[in-house]
Amino acid sequence: MNAVQNAQVNWRRVVRKYMKPSNLKSYWQIANSIVPYALCWIVAYFAYQYSIFLCLAVALVAQVFLLRIFIVMHDCGHSSFFKSKKFNSFWGFICGIITFSPYHQWTSAHHTHHKHSGNLDYRGVGDIDTYTVEEYSKLTKFEKLKYKALRSPFVFIILGGIYTFVLEHRFTKKNDGFKERMSVHGTNLGILLFGITMSYFTGFGFYVLFQLSVIGLAASAGIFLFYVQHQYEDVYWRTKQEWNHFEASMKGSSYLKLPKVLQWATGNIGFHNIHHLCSSIPNYNLEKAYKENQIFQNCTQLGLKESFRCLFLNLYDTKTNRLISFKEYRKRFNK
């Protein structure tokens, strides 16, 4: 048995020691995320009295804590944050209101993403649309133009972030079950009540400016992180007959190596290969799992510089198993 085969056989045994959540660590993460976020609202209100730009500067800080709150919701959705299902659901719902994300609806879509990540035959749920070279070549000129527009970093990161969290998450979907629909309505009600309360005490103008600024910044940062952890040159995409969970996790999800402060701000989500291999590991155990096991280190590692280059890779070439840019497509196929 070679090293790769051995890793595939033993990884379930290896991850068990990291799967146990700690209530103390979980509540500490909630505290050091939600409390500073609330303080940012207070500071921003007083800053708003002097300058809109000073208020927006506070929003840059606040979005860091909003990202961490989203990671808490994310872990609750995987039932990895608390041992108790009720605690996971409660805090997931609360964090969902704060992040404008209907907890059960988002969790359902995210589970689909985990189940089929890297599978060419199951694209389109919980991920960013990616066409193969063959599929793209068969599109009409208008369809190609539309795809190019959607794959523009400005569109899918800036506009896409605002659209997803401010608009799309406000509506139920055709295949939503009762729990998913109720999470949408409950989240919308929570957002409305919070908005009315804040507007009453601080003014509608301040509430809209600060709330939308923070949501927009955090959403864009979150989509950027999600994108570069599944969209890089040697990413893994296979048909369902060839698809393998271990390889899809190790090769289809990157390790985004961030400076310590950014790693903290993003809740260790950079260890995405391990997270996809075993989503039951709480985010605060991911770094330890990575450092203690060689099998988790055999993955694509990206730094910030390399991650920005990923924004311009757009088509998957099934012949070379590489993600390529539109520029390379034109050069190779004269189209």
Image (cartoon, rainbow, N blue to C red):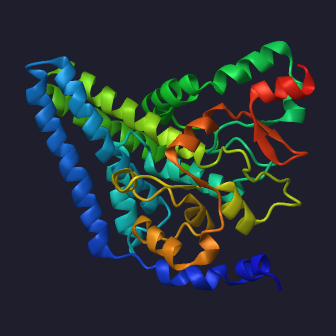
What is the x, y in percent for residue 151?
66, 27
Name the residue: 76% across, 41% down.
323
On screen, residue 211 versus residue 204, left or right, reads right
**Which sits in the foreground, 99 or 191?**
99
Above or below, 87 relative to 133: below
- Above or below, comparing residue 282 to residue 194 in the picture: below
Asked if residue 109 shows in the view, the reply is yes
Residue occupying the far front of the picture: 305
Where residue 330 appears, as percent x and y from the top left, is: 84, 23
Residue 294: % across, % down: 60, 76
Q: Position of residue 246 (x, y in %)?
A: 71, 68
Depth order, front residue of 53/48:
53
Residue nearest the viewer, comparing 330 with 11: 330
**The C terminus, quarter of image:** top right
Q: Within the image, what quadrant is residue 47 found in? A: top left
Q: Quadrant of the N terminus?
A: bottom right
> Residue shown at 25%/66% (left/top)?
28
Q: Residue at x 72, y 60 (%)?
A: 248
Q: Residue furthest top?
A: 142
